[in-house]
Image: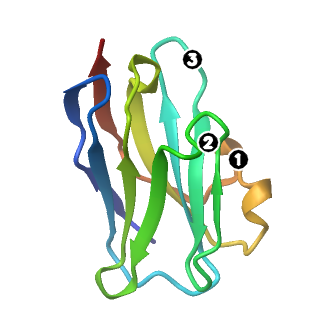
Amino acid sequence: QVHLVESGGGGVQAGDSLRLSCAASVRIFSNYAMAWFRQAPGKEREFVAAIRWNSSTTRYADSVKGRFTIAKDNAKNTVYLQMNSLKPEDTAVYYCAADGTGRSLYDLDYYGMDYWGKGTLVTVSS
């Protein structure tokens, strides 16, 4: 069982930056993929970014490409989401998730992730 705990959310102005963290309770195995999803009020949860634990291969949603960066610290079992140039439409609850199936990062979706954190709220004001 993997417990994921997100932190770093908050209220910021448009154009500001935030860094989210997701700490795992156990060592992340090399075939795992770690991902960030988000859910805005009244909308479905959507993919944001993902990283393969053993290769650092990444994938981003088009809406955040060039503004967000996903990274990991193997020693700390922690994955980060650096969010720059934030926009009001980035307002959402951000969730960390883990997938242990070894499937392609491009096959990750909300329905198939193995573990989820409880989320952290990011609010971006205009």
Distance from label 2 to label 3 (Cα)? 12 Å
Q: Which residue matches tag 1?
A: 109
Q: Earlier in the sequence, mark 1 or mark 3?
A: 3
Q: Quadrant of residue 4?
A: bottom left
Q: Amino acid at mark 2?
A: Phe
Labels 1 & 2 near each other (Cβ < 8 A): yes
Residue 97 coordinates in the image, percent (x, y):
51, 56
Q: Amino acid at mark 3?
A: Lys
In percent of the image, x 79 and y 55: which residue is there? 107
Figure check: 111 above or below 92:
below
Residue situated in front as seen by the camera: 84 or 38: 84
Residue situated in front as seen by the camera: 2 or 30: 30
Residue 87 coordinates in the image, percent (x, y):
41, 24
Single out the mark in the foreground, 1 or 2. 2
Labels 2 & 3 near each other (Cβ < 8 A): no
Q: Which residue matches tag 3?
A: 43
Q: Around disc 3, counting alpha carbons within 10 Å, would you say few (fewer than 14), some (14 to 19), or many (20 or more)?
A: few
Q: Which residue matches tag 2?
A: 47
Name the quarter where the C terminus is drawn.
Answer: top left
